[in-house]
């Protein structure tokens, strides 16, 4: 249904690690379909939730987006799970019903939105799942974990792009009960497991003071199955590295000190997080997926010049406390300096790119 | 990365007798003996007769309330030489506990946290447990890089005995791990350590 996923099968295996020499590149099409998260020249932290309905002609057409990096990202997930067992995937025992909910949601969405790649055949609880890009053709009994080679959540999310955190509703809050998070931005799943909504948002500055958290939680608790909502978030990172967990910080944090105004275009990546939230039907749980997109500043300039200008302005006016929280205060100025060479100051459209009259990538 | 001012530290209660309890377990460590004395004083003689007291004499501040606790006429009082032994004792006791058991915890954050891990493993809900902090706010810290647990941490920056990295202690608390998070303090530029300070102990 979208233009991009047809390239899924032909994509060579990209890498997201230094050992793999970061062999990750975006095609022009992949850049121009991104859910670019800056509707205004000035960035304001906000909840910015909207109904998760198909929009535009890019990453927001599908319930769970996949793109040209699908096969590579699944390979990266398998590698991370192999290298650090027990760190990236955890599910508390009482979350089994929610695991099946999640498997169903992902597989139904993929099969509906990308029928050329995925097929889900149901005969009562006897399901057949075909994943052509990964060469999988399995039969299992929905609800019976013994018919799968691993937990249903692990099975489904090993075949999905993005990370997935599943929360249970308990005592009027949402509590983390399971997660597949091989591409975490600076937090620990082991540490956050079992935390409630206020606790796991503890390290985010300003939220408590602004009352955003209470309002967000009230909103989320009213959510019903079949009516997902989404928001976008972002950060900067160095190299196309997906796995930036707290656990491995000693490996990747030194990269932050190597960015200069000269190399920022190649080294600094905008990390876009598309977060579509779904209420789960049987367990009444909530899934909080984080679909992460990486794009270098240079790729933005080459393929989406207006987005590069917008990013320049948003970064230049950013609250230093947010730069610190997002972890790039050390190279913030270098990124702004590099981008400034590519901003002529021309006025830009406001609004997300997937709404009418929103900011488009620019160029041709 | 936010280090201070994170709002995930537990909020503690004040120990008062839970009237709907049929059996009471009161576990404390060091200064936590103080709140326990007050709790036992507030109980009816019947409640006291249904109460088992577990007390560890290990203390960071040196307070020992054992003699005063022995003055109460409780069902049983068991003394432990260390906090770890008391938590194991609690585990053994809860393994035989019946419905209607109420748990009271008092002492250091590390003691309360590790005791809560045990209580949670038996499916005890928050409304069946009261927790009162007493004594020093020394911290139990989990190293995010080697998973070593350090007890009684008082400094913002310290060296992890597990991996020898210098860790900075974030004000970020995990009830599941019963610990604060320690992260490499000189992550970006090795050797460039932030200013050290006493934690709010």
Image: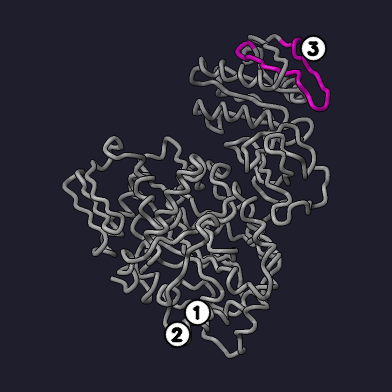
- Whether marks 3 and 2 lie on the same chain: no
Q: Position of residue A170 (x, y in %)?
A: 48, 42
The kind of secondary structure element at disc 3 is helix
In-front residue for pair A50/A112: A112
Q: Is residue A261 above or below residue A227?
A: below
Q: Is residue B15 above or below residue A352?
A: above
Q: Find the distance from the CA under tag 3 to the CA under tag 2.
A: 77 Å
Q: Position of residue A93 (x, y in %)?
A: 42, 35
Q: Given this view, does label 1 or label 3 mark the residue nearer the observer?
A: 1
Q: Find the distance from the CA under tag 1 to the CA under tag 3.
A: 70 Å
Question: On the image, numbered disc 3 is attached to which residue?
Answer: B67
Q: Is residue B181 above or below residue A274?
A: above
Question: On the image, numbered disc 1 is attached to which residue?
Answer: A351
Q: Which residue is at a point 62% across and 76% down the rendered structure image? A: A314
What segment is highlighted magenta in the picture? B49-72
Which label sits on residue A357?
2
Q: Find the distance from the CA under tag 1 to the CA under tag 2.
A: 7 Å
- Whether marks 1 and 3 lie on the same chain: no
Residue A354 visible to an observer of this rendering = no
Tell whether label 3 touches label 1 (CB within 8 Å): no
Q: Which residue is at a point 62% across and 12% down the rendered structure image? A: B46
Tell whether label 2 touches label 1 (CB within 8 Å): yes
Q: Residues within 10 Å of mark 2 (few under 14, many from 20)?
A: few
Q: Earlier in the sequence, mark 1 or mark 2?
A: 1
In-front residue for pair A15/B183: A15
Q: What chain is tagged by disc 3? A: B
């Amino acid at each position: 249904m979208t233009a991009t996923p047809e390239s899924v099968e032909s994509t060579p295996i990209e890498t997201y690690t230094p050992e793999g020499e970061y062999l990750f590149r975006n095609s022009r099409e992949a850049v121009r379909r991104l859910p670019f998260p800056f509707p205004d020249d000035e960035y304001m932290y906000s909840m910015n939730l909207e109904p998760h309905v198909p929009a535009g002609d890019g990453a927001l057409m599908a319930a769970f987006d996949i793109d040209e990096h699908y096969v590579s990202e699944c390979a990266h997930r398998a590698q991370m799970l192999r290298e650090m067992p027990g760190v990236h995937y955890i599910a508390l025992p009482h979350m089994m019903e929610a695991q099946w909910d999640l498997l169903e949601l992902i597989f139904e969405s993929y099969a509906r939105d990308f029928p050329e790649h995925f097929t889900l055949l149901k005969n009562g609880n006897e399901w057949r799942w075909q994943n052509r890009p990964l060469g999988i053709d399995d039969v299992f009994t929905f609800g019976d974990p013994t018919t799968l080679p691993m937990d249903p959540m692990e099975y489904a999310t090993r075949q999905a792009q993005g990370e997935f955190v599943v929360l249970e509703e308990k005592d009027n809050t949402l509590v983390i009960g399971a997660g597949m998070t091989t591409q975490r931005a600076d937090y620990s799943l082991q540490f956050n497991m079992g935390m409630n909504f206020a606790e796991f948002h503890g390290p985010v500055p300003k939220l408590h003071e602004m009352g955003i958290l209470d309002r967000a939680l009230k909103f989320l608790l009213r959510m019903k199955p079949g009516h997902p909502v989404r928001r976008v978030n972002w950060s900067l990172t160095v190299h196309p590295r997906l796995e930036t967990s707290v656990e491995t910080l000693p490996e990747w944090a030194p990269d932050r000190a190597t960015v200069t105004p000269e190399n920022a275009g190649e080294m600094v990546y905008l990390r876009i997080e598309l977060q579509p939230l779904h209420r789960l039907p049987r367990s009444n749980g909530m899934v909080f997926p984080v679909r992460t997109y990486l794009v270098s500043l240079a790729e933005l300039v080459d393929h989406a010049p207006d987005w590069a200008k917008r990013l320049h302005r948003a970064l230049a006016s950013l609250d230093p406390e947010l730069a610190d929280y997002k972890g790039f205060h050390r190279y913030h100025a270098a990124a702004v300096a590099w981008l400034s060479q590519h901003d002529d100051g021309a006025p830009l459209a406001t609004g997300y790119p997937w709404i009418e009259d929103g900011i488009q990538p620019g160029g041709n | 990365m936010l280090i201070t001012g994170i709002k995930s530290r537990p909020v503690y209660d004040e120990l008062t007798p839970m009237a709907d309890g049929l059996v009471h377990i009161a576990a404390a460590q060091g200064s936590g003996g103080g709140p326990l004395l007050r709790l036992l004083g507030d109980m009816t003689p019947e409640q006291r007769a249904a109460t088992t007291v577990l007390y560890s004499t290990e203390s960071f501040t040196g307070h020992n309330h054992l003699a005063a606790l022995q003055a109460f006429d409780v069902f049983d009082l068991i003394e432990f030489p260390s906090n770890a032994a008391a938590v194991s004792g609690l585990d053994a006791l809860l393994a035989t506990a019946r419905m209607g058991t109420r748990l009271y915890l008092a002492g250091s954050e590390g003691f309360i946290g590790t005791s809560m891990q045990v209580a949670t493993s038996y499916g005890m809900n928050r409304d069946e447990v009261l927790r009162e902090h007493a004594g020093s706010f020394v911290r139990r810290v989990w190293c995010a890089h080697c998973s070593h647990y350090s007890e009684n941490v008082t400094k913002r920056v310290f060296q992890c005995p597990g991996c020898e990295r210098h860790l900075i202690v974030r004000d970020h608390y995990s009830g599941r791990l019963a610990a604060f998070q320690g992260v490499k303090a000189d992550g970006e530029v090795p050797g460039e350590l932030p200013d050290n300070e006493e934690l709010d102990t």
